[in-house]
Image (cartoon, grey):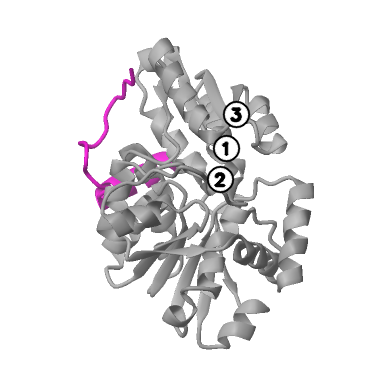
Amino acid sequence: MSTLKSSPASGSYPSMHDVVDTAHRLRGKVLRTPVWRWQTGAVKEIFGDGTEVWLKLELFQKTGTFKVRGALNSIEALDDDARQRGVVAVSAGNHAIAVAWAARSNDVHAKVVMPRHASPARIEACREYGAEVILMPDVHQAFSHGLAIEEAEGRTLIHPYDGPLVAQGTATVGLELVEQVPDLDAVLVPVGGGGLLAGIAAAVKQRLPDCAVYGVEPEGADAMTRSFESGKPQRLERVDSIADSLGAPYAMDYSFDVCRQFADGMVRVADDDICTAMAHLYRDVKLVAEPAAATAAAGLFGPLREVLRGKRVGLIVCGSNIDLPRFSALLQRGLAIA
């Protein structure tokens, strides 16, 4: 059973009051990450001088990803009894790390359930932050086991991508971006389960109604795109993408509803395109971006290239939790294609 001090009514979306209030509460606890205009290399070659591309560098956030915003917002909302019982999270890595960090910051015990294929570096990071790590054969079994722990131990499940508290946290990324780069024409957001897109789209659209917001998903982990196409949340039988932190096995009602209300559309990108975008980000901006963090750039260079030519575009660079051997292998793959 989950016990919260307060949360918006089921089905509501993050209002600007919610977003500004969340940003105020998290101030000093999370970082206000910088933006950087990408003006060299691939952007110059593909778009020339008429297109502005701004990177929102959430990979510089505490724990290495945006996930800490939603995790901290969720854990700080727990009442005393729920804090005593502890929390549980399910994740391939980034959300698990964020929950481990946020739980330790609030003196709350955390269990994190991760698929066995998760990066060893991410597993070790969770343990270093004091979380108890449980490994399962795959992401579907990880989710099932996490729910079983929630039921058996009375822990609060800190969901990786669904619910008002998560969306309020991720919305602060969008709020910062529109304050840092006024008058954007479009924002591109990597999508796994949709929690980041839901929050950012809600914040951006309420501040800049004419700014287009697009979600970008890997072809092998496209639950939200399928959900947009069908009109209801969809479940994947199989997840197959190098962007493991975007490998949500299904979309859920809340995040889907908010995404559908505020986002302008979804596009898919291939793993090769993600590797190429990783190579561009490393070559041009010297960023060590995990595959998920390069997905928005892959959308810009691929399916949205002509749509966004001549526009002022924001890209969410969402994380950097990747071990050196894997980054090197994917970088070489991207350089070979580029």
| Contact flag, marks 3 and 2 (Cβ < 8 Å) | no
Amino acid type of the residue that numbered disc 3 sits on in the rendered structure: Pro
Amino acid type of the residue that numbered disc 2 sits on in the rendered structure: Ser
| Contact flag, marks 1 and 3 (Cβ < 8 Å) | no
**Was residue 230 drawn as part of the magenta stretch in this picture?**
no
How many labels sit on residues?
Answer: 3
Which residue appears farthest toward the bottom when viewing the image? 49
Q: Is residue 65 visible?
A: no
Q: Residues within 10 Å of mark 2 (few under 14, many from 20)?
A: many
- Specify the quadrant of the image occupied by residue 156: top left
Q: Quadrant of the C terminus?
A: bottom right
- Specify the quadrant of the image occupied by residue 124: top right
Residue drawn 64% across the image and 53% down it: 290
Amino acid type of the residue that numbered disc 1 sits on in the rendered structure: Ala
Residue drawn 58% across the image and 46% down it: 244
**In the rendered structure, which segment of residues is drawn in magenta?**
1-26
Q: Which residue is mark 2?
A: 245
Residue drawn 36% across the image and 12% down it: 81
Q: Residue 318 placed where, x, y %?
A: 54, 53
Q: Quadrant of the N terminus?
A: top left
Q: Which residue is mark 3?
A: 137
Q: Which residue is mark 1?
A: 92
- Of pointers 1 and 3, the one earlier in the residue sequence: 1
262 and 60: which one is in front?
262
